[in-house]
Image (cartoon, rainbow, N blue to C red):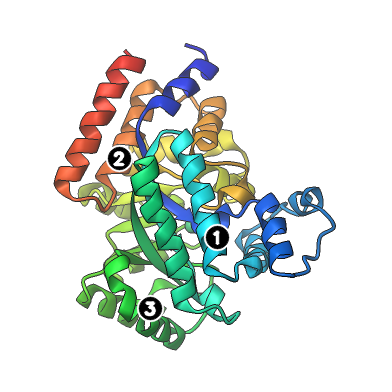
Amino acid sequence: MNSAERLACIRLLPKAELHLHIEGSLEPELMFQLAERNAIQLPYASVDALRQAYQFHNLQEFLDLYYQGMSVLQTEQDFYDLTWAYLQRSAAEGVIHVEIFFDPQGHLQRGVDFSVQIEGIYRALCDGETQLGISFRLILSFLRHLSEQSAFETLELAMPWLNRIDGVGLDSSELGHPPEKFARVFARCRELGLRVTAHAGEEGPPEYVWQALDLLKVQRIDHGNRALEDEVLIERLRNEQIPLTVCPLSNLKLCVVEDMSQHPILKLLDAGLRVTVNSDDPAYFGGYLQDNFAALLAHLPITDAQILQLIRNSFIGSWLSDSEKQACLKRLEAAASEVMP
Ligand SMILES: Nc1ncnc2[nH]cnc12
Ligand SMILES: [Zn+2]
């Protein structure tokens, strides 16, 4: 099979996405529409001019535009439209389960209530479940460049909504904001029965991955690329089968890797780690899940068996119940035996 045929097969396989910032799925076209609807002036003349600006040399340069972009999200309907657009795209790519982050502090700082955010996102997720057959988990992500106190205040605001929130994450500027800064917040979240994950080892050193595991007691690591610099850490991740939510196009756009042919995903997989493929901020990084697989196929000697393992891992590493995982894996194997015999 050539790459186009293999990609067509991948599209037909049921998949899960575990690392997706809903604000990072805000396409320039929708950003302009929402800006007009809310009478907000964007500092770009056109959709094309905005897309042109998406050239980043590091995480911070991206984050500056990401926070600026989300300023158009004002009403419950805006959050609904954003989430619904992501779910429709994902359904078209064979995604059947999503675990998405939202960044409440990025909206609270602009005066948008927690209730506005979660009502819109959650209504779209429920519609996605009934109309598109996509199950979901929702993850509240704390911004690590803000204080521990701000994270605690955000958690307080989330308390009335905990029945809709499955877990918490940690994102934003990694360097200089080690996981240990949030050890007490995460301890409280775990006490509340929330699942926990954290971005670590994207730009930050292996030490941040250790801290995420030992101090935050995370069940997953978002990114984790730099774990490869520490053999003992790799052994720990392998022994405990900690899922890594790897994001190839994100890593390329943020210069975490120089070239897709140098992406460490196959090394991580060959080391026996529970690696998954994800799109992170697809509107900013050049594509959704399918585009990430396309990039891997185009630049790495990835086998069908490795592709299947990555997709299996997306269900195994998810926060679905064991019986839900088994059902998804069964669906995957049935589809695989038809399209990838
Ligand atoms: N890739 C990323 N790393 C850290 N914080 C983020 N927020 C949105 N995308 C992010
Ligand atoms: Zn991320």
Check the picture and name the quadrant holding the C terminus. top left
Numbered disc 1: secondary structure: helix
Identify the residue at horizontal 57%, vertical 51% (top origin). Answer: 256
Identify the residue at horizontal 77%, vertical 51% (top origin). Answer: 47
Q: Which amino acid type is shown beneath numbered disc 3?
A: Phe
Q: Which amino acid type is shown beneath numbered disc 2?
A: Asn
Instruction: Give percent across and percent down for residue 201.
Output: 45, 58
The residue tagged 2 is 313
Tag on residue 146? none
The residue tagged 3 is 182
Q: Residues within 10 Å of mark 2 (few under 14, many from 20)?
A: many
Q: Which amino acid type is shown beneath numbered disc 1?
A: Glu
Mark 2 → mark 3, Cα distance in angstroms:
28 Å
Mark 2 → mark 1, Cα distance in angstroms:
25 Å
Does residue 40 appear to the left or right of 180 in the view shown? Answer: right
The residue tagged 1 is 23
Q: Nearer the viewer, residue 227 or 196?
A: 196
Asked if the residue at tag 3 contacts the one at tag 2, i.e. Cβ–Cβ closer than 8 Å, the answer is no
Instruction: Give percent across and percent down for residue 143.
Output: 49, 73
